[in-house]
Image (spheres, grey):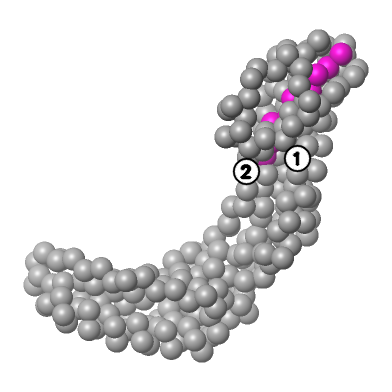
Amino acid sequence: MSLTPWFRSSLPLLVALQPLAVLSPAQAQGQIQLVCDGALVEARGNAELKRSTDRLQVSLSLEAEAPTADGALAELQARLAAVRGGLQRLEVKELEVTSPSTWQRPAERQRPAAVQASLQVTGQLAPARLQALIRQVGALPGVRLAPVATQADKAGDRAAQRQLLRAAYQDALGQAREIAAAIGLTQLRPLEVQLDGGFRPMPMLAKAADAAPPPFDPAELPTPTDRLGLTARFCAR
């Protein structure tokens, strides 16, 4: 795992006094205004943590069409059986299937009116089976693959959050020290920290491939990236 600080900040100067607190945005709204016997320096800190890919979150939509609703649902059920079998052979975990929905497609040029039925399928896939998913399941009738998102091992979430918190706070502290020095102050006392941010997946659009091109490589997928931002206030003297 690699840890990279990043930031965009606006750094207003205010005045306040309060024991150090770590607050969520909702908690911060209920706080009284801080007061300080010096100048309050407010800085925004951010951190980014790239993690190893443990699994892929995959999703697909499945569609079928027939002159009647019964016919469309029967065809959808048959296609789902083929998709479910393919996913089970790929050892997809946490397989979930939504209930089907139907709607009437109006007649178009050279196409009569019909009923369309669809549902959504999601699950967790080992990265090494990405190519097989695209070839074996993505090519089935009625299947439309959605973007694949990389995910990290959940067991490392707490440690990752601790690293992000430390890095984001140090980012804010460094900015606050620069501001304090710019106005002739040298001492900083932390007052308050407000947290925001969180995990944001980095998707890759997975599409069925032709026979000739090289296989889809899971190593080329963007790695799972956690981000955390916070606003820290310091009393500067």
What amino acid is at disc 2? Answer: Gly
97 with respect to 215 (left or right): left
Q: Position of residue 193 (x, y in %)?
A: 72, 32
87 with respect to 80 (left or right): right
Residue 215 in view: no
Q: Point out the stretch of residues depicted in magenta.
A: 229-237
**Image quarter (top left, top right, bottom left or bottom right) of the C terminus:** top right
27 with respect to 235 (left or right): left
Q: Main secondary structure of the magenta part?
A: strand
Image point 53% across, 80% down: which residue?
92
Q: Residues within 10 Å of mark 1 (few under 14, many from 20)?
A: many
Residue 197 badge: 2
Is 202 drawn above or below residue 120 in the view shown? above
Residue 123 badge: none
Image point 11% across, 77% down: which residue?
67
The residues bearing labels 1 and 2 have C-alpha atoms spaced at a distance of 11 Å
13 with respect to 199 (left or right): right
What amino acid is at disc 1? Answer: Ala
